[in-house]
Image (cartoon, helix red, strand yellow):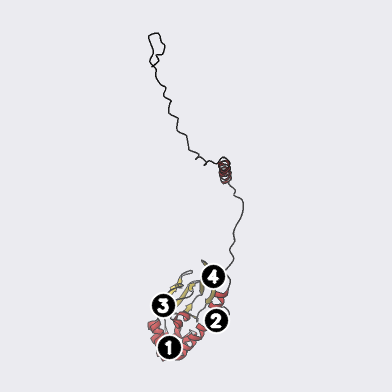
């Protein structure tokens, strides 16, 4: 369970009175993360998180490649953009090392912000900075995608080269003769034997005219 003292160490909640910290500590979820484990994936539903220990990386998937675009340390919060805009998480957040975070659901956050408006103002400022700052989401969207390398070279196997030469020679033979190339396993059917007309013979072996 998150203590009221730990909540007071989070910058945006430091101005809360003792009873408000106690109330928030009862509502917050205490989450332990191992390295590589996500507190929130890109596209997850909104919530507000605060880092209590360790280090959290902000991760954005661009053209199928994950890019680390920021980090959160103890006392920092994340999830301010979706909580302010009412959207899903535009980036993911995962533990870079063994970490501990607290999660506050939207209705619990808005209940505190309604009582202490300064909390909402600070979260709004952070959200604006995450969106339009020099390293914010707008700057990330304007970055060109990373270049992709295409490897061009000869095949080290002789089999594909032989197959290509065989295919080319068959195509050339077909185009010169005007006939379709035969399959390697094609065998022509044998011709049927010719039938000869039978003429009757006489007793001396000569043929009889009709």
Which of disc 4 and disc 2 is earlier in sequence? Answer: 4
SS for dot 3: strand
Asked whether the residues under the numbered discs 1 and 2 touch, taking CB atoms below 8 Å apart as contact, a structural biologist would say: no
Q: Which residue is mark 1?
A: 113
Q: Residue at x 54, y 70 (%)?
A: 67
Q: Nearer the viewer, residue 107 or 51?
A: 107
Foreground mark, 1 or 2?
2
Image quadrant in which you'd find residue 149: bottom right
Which of disc 4 and disc 3 is earlier in sequence? Answer: 3
SS for dot 2: helix
Asked whether the residues under the numbered discs 2 and 4 touch, taking CB atoms below 8 Å apart as contact, a structural biologist would say: no
Residue 116 percent across, percent down from the top left: 43, 91
Q: Which residue is mark 3?
A: 30
Which of disc 4 and disc 1 is earlier in sequence? Answer: 4
Q: Which residue is mark 4?
A: 67
Residue 164 percent across, percent down from the top left: 57, 45
SS for dot 4: strand
Which of disc 3 and disc 1 is earlier in sequence? Answer: 3
Asked whether the residues under the numbered discs 1 and 4 touch, taking CB atoms below 8 Å apart as contact, a structural biologist would say: no
Asked whether the residues under the numbered discs 3 and 2 touch, taking CB atoms below 8 Å apart as contact, a structural biologist would say: no
Residue 23 percent across, percent down from the top left: 38, 86
Foreground mark, 2 or 4?
2
Query: Please, which residue is most extreme toward the front here?
Result: 210
Marking on residue 81: none
Query: Which quadrant, please, contains the C terminus?
Result: top left
Foreground mark, 1 or 3?
1
Q: Which residue is mark 2?
A: 132
Whole-number angstrom distance, CA of label 3 to CA of label 2: 31 Å
Whole-number angstrom distance, CA of label 2 to CA of label 4: 18 Å
Residue 122 percent across, percent down from the top left: 49, 87
Q: Is residue 147 above or below residue 130?
A: above
């Amino acid at each position: 369970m998150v203590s009221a003292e730990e909540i007071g160490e989070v910058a945006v909640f430091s101005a809360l009175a003792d009873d408000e910290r106690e109330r928030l500590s009862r509502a917050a979820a205490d989450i332990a993360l191992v390295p590589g484990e996500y507190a929130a994936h890109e596209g997850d539903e909104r919530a507000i998180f605060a880092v209590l220990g360790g280090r959290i990386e902000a991760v954005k998937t661009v053209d199928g490649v994950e890019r680390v675009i920021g980090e959160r340390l103890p006392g920092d919060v994340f999830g301010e953009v979706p909580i302010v805009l009412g959207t899903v998480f535009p980036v993911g957040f995962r533990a870079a090392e063994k970490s501990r975070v607290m999660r506050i659901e939207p209705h619990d956050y808005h209940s505190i912000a309604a009582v202490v408006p300064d909390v909402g103002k600070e979260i709004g400022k952070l959200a604006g900075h995450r969106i339009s700052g020099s390293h914010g989401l707008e700057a990330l969207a304007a970055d060109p995608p990373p270049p992709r390398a295409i490897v061009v070279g000869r095949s080290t196997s002789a089999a594909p080269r032989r197959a290509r030469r065989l295919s080319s020679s068959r195509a050339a033979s077909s185009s010169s003769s005007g006939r379709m190339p035969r399959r390697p396993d094609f065998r022509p059917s044998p011709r049927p034997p010719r039938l000869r007309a039978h003429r009757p013979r006489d007793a001396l072996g000569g043929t009889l005219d009709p």
